[in-house]
Image (tube, helix red, strand yellow):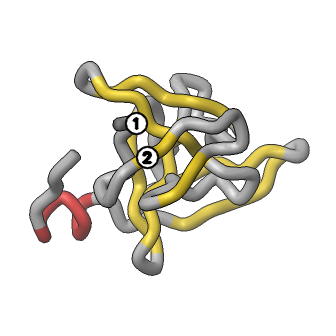
């Protein structure tokens, strides 16, 4: 997964908890869906419903990524189910 500075800027968002799930909204208040969001040096993924994914795998562009309980993408570590994810977060 690679992103430019423009991607990071366009992914600026506010995180809000609604009914025990986090949702991401862009600066104009539009809810982000089915996309990666970047916040404070970490990547998160929001589903088609807009809810942030946590404790689960996401397949993006043919690669698998694991999102921790906090929702952040794991990098350079083993997932709870024993798979190694590399520097860019993709399952090796």
- Above or below 81: residue 88: below
Q: Residues within 10 Å of mark 1 (few under 14, many from 20)?
A: many
- Report helix, strand or loop for mark 1: loop
Residue 91 is labelled as 1
**Residue at which label 2 appears:** 85
| Number of residues whose C-alpha sits closer than 10 Å to that of mark 2, classed few (under 14), some (14–19) or many (20 or more) | many
Q: Does residue 69 appear in the picture of this structure?
A: yes
Q: Residue at x 46, y 79 (%)?
A: 40
What is the count of numbered marks? 2
Look at 41% across and 24% down and name the residue there.
59
In this view, which residue lies farthest toward the right? 19
Name above or below for residue 15 compared with residue 58: below
Q: Camera-side residue: 40 or 56? A: 56
Q: In the visual, does 10 lie left or right of 24? A: left
Q: Quadrant of the C terminus?
A: top left
Q: Which sits in the foreground, 88 or 92?
A: 92
- Image quarter for residue 75? bottom left
Q: Position of residue 60 (x, y in %)?
A: 33, 27
- Is the C-beta separation of discs 1 and 2 under 8 Å? yes
19 or 64, which lies in front?
Answer: 64
Q: Residue 71 location in percent, x, y?
A: 64, 52
Q: Is residue 61 left or right of residue 75?
A: left
The residue that appears at 43% across and 60% down in the rendered structure is 76
- Residue 19, percent across and down? 89, 43
In this view, the residue farthest toward the bottom is 40
Q: Quadrant of the N terminus?
A: top left
Q: Earlier in the sequence, mark 1 or mark 2?
A: 2
Res 20 label? none
Please say if 5 is above or below 88.
Answer: below
Question: Rounded to the nearest whole Å, what is the CA distance between mark 1 and mark 2?
Answer: 4 Å
């Amino acid at each position: 997964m690679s992103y430019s500075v423009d991607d990071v800027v366009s992914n600026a968002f506010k995180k809000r908890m609604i009914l025990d799930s986090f949702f991401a909204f862009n600066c104009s208040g539009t809810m982000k869906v089915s996309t990666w969001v970047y916040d404070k040096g970490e990547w998160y993924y929001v589903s088609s419903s807009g809810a942030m994914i946590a404790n689960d795998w996401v397949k993006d562009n043919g690669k698998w990524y694991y999102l921790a309980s906090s929702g952040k993408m794991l990098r350079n570590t083993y997932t709870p189910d024993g798979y190694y994810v590399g520097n860019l977060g993709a399952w090796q």
